[in-house]
Amino acid sequence: MRRLQIHKPSCLHFHPHGHKLPCLDCNPQGFIRMVHHLIERCIVFRMGRDECMRTLAKHANISPLVTFTVWDELLKENKVFFEAYSRRRMLPSNVLNRHPQETSNGRTWRR
């Protein structure tokens, strides 16, 4: 499993509960934005929804239900992106790293 580094924003303030990061009770919009940002980081690492849920639960202590809900809302808002993302995740990494003008037989495509 990939290790996701979580960077804490520098402009955080202490909440009444004594923690620095936004929480669902104190600052729901900030918390959802933070989860949204972390999901985007997971997408950069080509993680699927379930792997992202496990990773955020383990490394950021975010409930899988919250990650699932935010992911689902992102999916509704960006259906075309997530359809393309799902197809692209299924491709082998060597296909993704190939030069855009190179064909499968190694020849260069010319216009």
Image (tube, helix red, strand yellow):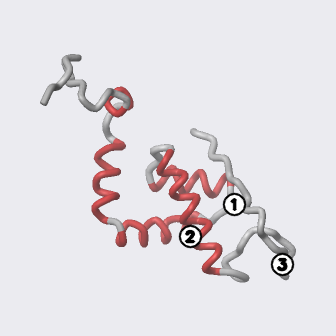
- Kindly state the secondary structure of the residue where label 1 is placed: loop
Q: Report the number of numbered marks.
A: 3
**Tag 1 residue:** 61
In space, the residues marked 3 and 1 are separated at their CA atoms by 16 Å
Q: Residue at x 34, y 31 (%)?
A: 92
**Above or below — where is 7 with respect to 111?**
below
Q: Is residue 61 left or right of residue 47?
A: right
Residue 34 coordinates in the image, percent (x, y): 62, 66
Residue drawn 71% across and 75% down?
23
Residue 36, horizontal then vertical, whole percent: 54, 65
Mark linked to residue 66: 2
Which residue type does callout 1 highlight? Asn
N-terminal-most mark, 3 or 1: 3
The mark that comes first in sequence, 2 or 1, is: 1
> Looking at this rendering, what residue extends furthest in the front direction?
111
Mark-to-mark CA distance, 3 and 2: 19 Å
Q: Which callout, 3 or 2, points at the residue further toward the start of the chain? A: 3
In depth, the one of 71 and 105 nearer the eye is 105
Q: Within 10 angstroms of label 3, few (less than 14), some, or many (20 or more) residues?
A: few
Label 2 crowd bin: few (<14), some (14–19), many (20+), radius 10 Å:
some
**How far apart, in angstroms, are the residues tagged by discs 2 and 1?**
11 Å
Quadrant position of the N terminus in the picture: top right
For disc 3, the marked residue is 17
Residue 111 in the image: state x and y as whole percent: 12, 30
Q: Secondary structure at mark 3?
A: loop
Q: Which mark is residue 85?
A: none
> In this rendering, would 32 be left or right of 12?
left
Q: Disc 2 residue type?
A: Val
